[in-house]
């Protein structure tokens, strides 16, 4: 019996930390099939500390260590071929980010890699997203996180240029995004779409996934620009508690989903696109595929 190859990925974001367990089934000449067996999400908002105070607080550092220690036990029980832990904007910007990485390594033996925006964009644009794309269509990929937004121009299913911007849902919530950052994003989009006909957008991130779900869209389907505006109107008239009890939003999403939508809508407007494809695939998925590719080329060393 082909039980598949097990891998695990840890995505340390600004709004939450995720642990993904996935199994890849190989079927001879057919395309390998990825099964997401379990996704554990810890709502730890590291970005709130960093974007206000410049570092991760002692309280959240302790919660972070406890979370990673628990993840390590789960990884040991799952027994993957290997795993990778990647941290993004909050850890990139935290003055004590490297100290926390060293503490985690010492106490849990998990090696956290703080990746830059370019590598983050590359990992997110995995084969799992490519299966929904058409070679004849040009796209702008918009990945909105709590602390940053990664943009890529996709031509012939390849990222031709990418850039990370310090604009994210948690940063906006805390009032830590200035007009200059918006203007830089707008100029970058305008400059990189003026000589190429960008037809559609691709959206990554928990907030666009939730918007698509609220609209009844299945994985890999399109959401219209106006549909996003309409659903956000309905969300904005609700207070924080109502967003949770009446709309079913998580507490750590209820206060940022409208800020995230602002980023998607502005990027779509500046790129001149009216539809956004939502494949519901993120950084953790890309890490799994990278680990599998390295395994197949004998570059991966088993660490569990």
Image (cartoon, grey):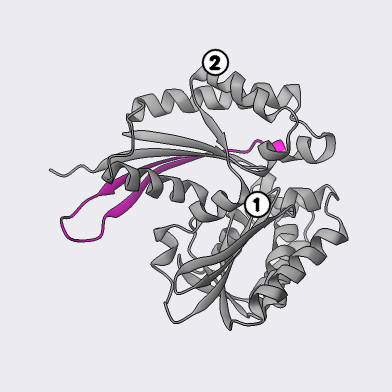
Residue at 38 percent across and 67 percent down: it is: 131
Residue at 33 percent across and 48 percent down: it is: 293
Considering every residue shown, the one lying at the far left of the view is 1
Per the image, label 1 sits on a secondary structure element best described as: loop
Is 40 one of the magenta-colored residues? yes
Quarter of the image containing the N terminus? top left
Q: Which residue is mark 1?
A: 145
Q: Decide if residue 125 is in sight here.
A: yes
Please tell me the numbered disc located at residue 107: 2
Labels 1 and 2: the sequence-earlier one? 2
Count how many numbered circles sit on residues in the image: 2
Q: Is residue 86 above or below residue 198?
A: above
Considering every residue shown, the one lying at the far top of the view is 107
User: Where is residue 277 shown, x and y percent of the image?
Assistant: 52, 71
The magenta stretch spans which residues? 20-46
**Which one is in front, 211 or 261?**
261
User: Where is residue 240 shown, x and y percent of the image?
Assistant: 77, 51
User: Where is residue 256 shown, x and y percent of the image?
Assistant: 73, 53
């Amino acid at each position: 019996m082909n039980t598949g190859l097990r891998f695990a990925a840890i995505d340390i974001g600004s709004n939450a930390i995720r642990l993904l367990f996935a199994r890849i089934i190989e079927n001879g000449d057919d395309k390998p099939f990825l099964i997401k067996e379990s996704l554990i999400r810890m709502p730890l908002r590291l970005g709130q500390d960093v974007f206000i105070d410049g570092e991760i607080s002692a309280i959240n550092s302790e919660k972070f260590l406890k979370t990673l220690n628990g993840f390590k036990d789960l990884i040991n029980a799952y027994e993957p071929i290997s795993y990778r832990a990647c941290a993004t904007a909050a850890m990139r910007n935290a003055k004590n980010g490297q100290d926390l990485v060293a503490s985690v390594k010492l106490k849990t033996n998990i090696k956290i890699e703080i990746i830059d925006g370019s590598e983050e964009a590359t990992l997110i644009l995995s084969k799992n997203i490519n299966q929904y794309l058409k070679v004849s269509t040009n796209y702008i990929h918009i990945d909105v996180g709590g602390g940053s937004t990664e943009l890529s121009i996709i031509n012939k299913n390849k990222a031709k240029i990418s850039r990370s911007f310090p604009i994210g849902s948690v940063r906006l919530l805390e009032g830590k995004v200035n007009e200059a950052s918006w203007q830089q994003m707008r100029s970058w989009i305008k400059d990189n779409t003026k000589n190429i006909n960008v037809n559609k957008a691709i959206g990554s991130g928990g907030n666009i996934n939730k918007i698509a779900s609220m609209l009844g869209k299945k994985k890999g389907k399109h959401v219209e620009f106006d549909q996003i505006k309409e659903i956000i109107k309905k969300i904005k008239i609700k207070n924080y508690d109502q967003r949770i009890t009446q709309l079913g939003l998580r507490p750590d999403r209820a206060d940022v989903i409208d800020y995230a939508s602002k980023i998607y809508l502005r990027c779509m407007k500046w790129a001149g696109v009216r539809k956004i494809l939502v494949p519901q695939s993120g950084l953790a998925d890309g890490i799994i595929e990278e680990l599998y590719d390295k395994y197949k080329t004998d570059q991966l060393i088993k660490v569990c």
